Image: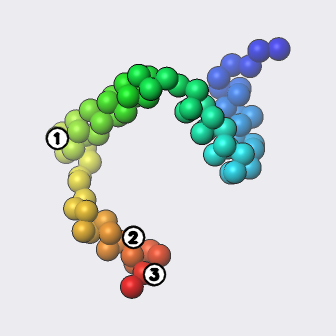
Amino acid sequence: MTLSADELATRAMALSGEARALLAEKLIESLDQESISAIWLTEAKKRRDEVRSGKVKAIPGIEVMQNVRKLFDCK
């Protein structure tokens, strides 16, 4: 029996968080470096376009770090 990608994803979502993380790592490792680079380039361009269009707002790094420190109660 062959599973479709959607069926496989549904079954994978039933795994524990640790098992899903391991599966994700193995799937990413199975991609060749050229494919990974192409995927990240596409994602970077999408994010750039979202910022340029005003769809999303960039948050200054210092603000992000302040929020992280508050979230994790860091001094």
Who comes first in sequence, dot 3 or dot 2? 2
For disc 2, the marked residue is 68
Q: Work out whether residue 64 or residue 23 is closer to the camera in this orientation and state it.
A: 23
Report the residue at 55% width, 33% height from top: 28
Which three-letter amino acid code belongs to the residue tagged 1? Arg
Mark 1 or 2: in front is: 2
Disc 1 packing (10 Å; few <14; some 14–19; many ≥20): few
Q: Is residue 72 left or right of residue 2?
A: left
Who comes first in sequence, dot 1 or dot 2? 1
- The reply to whether the C-beta atoms of the residues labelled 1 and 3 are less than 8 Å apart is no
Q: In which quarter of the image is the N terminus?
A: top right
- The reply to whether the C-beta atoms of the residues labelled 3 and 2 are less than 8 Å apart is no
Q: In which quarter of the image is residue 62?
A: bottom left
Who comes first in sequence, dot 1 or dot 3? 1
Which three-letter amino acid code belongs to the residue tagged 2? Val
The image shows residue 29 at horizontal and vertical percentages of: 56, 32
Q: Can residue 64 be seen at all in this image of the molecule?
A: yes
Q: Residue furthest right?
A: 1
Report the residue at 38% width, 28% height from top: 37
Report the residue at 42% width, 81% height from top: 74
Q: In which quarter of the image is the C terminus?
A: bottom left
Q: Work out whether residue 45 or residue 31 is closer to the camera in this orientation and state it.
A: 31
What's the distance in space between the residues labelled 1 and 2, CA to CA?
A: 25 Å
Q: In this view, does 36 lie to the left or right of 10?
A: left
From this view, report whether residue 75 is shown above or below residue 49.
Answer: below
For disc 1, the marked residue is 52
Helix, strand, or loop for circle 3?
A: loop
Which circle marks residue 73 in the picture?
3
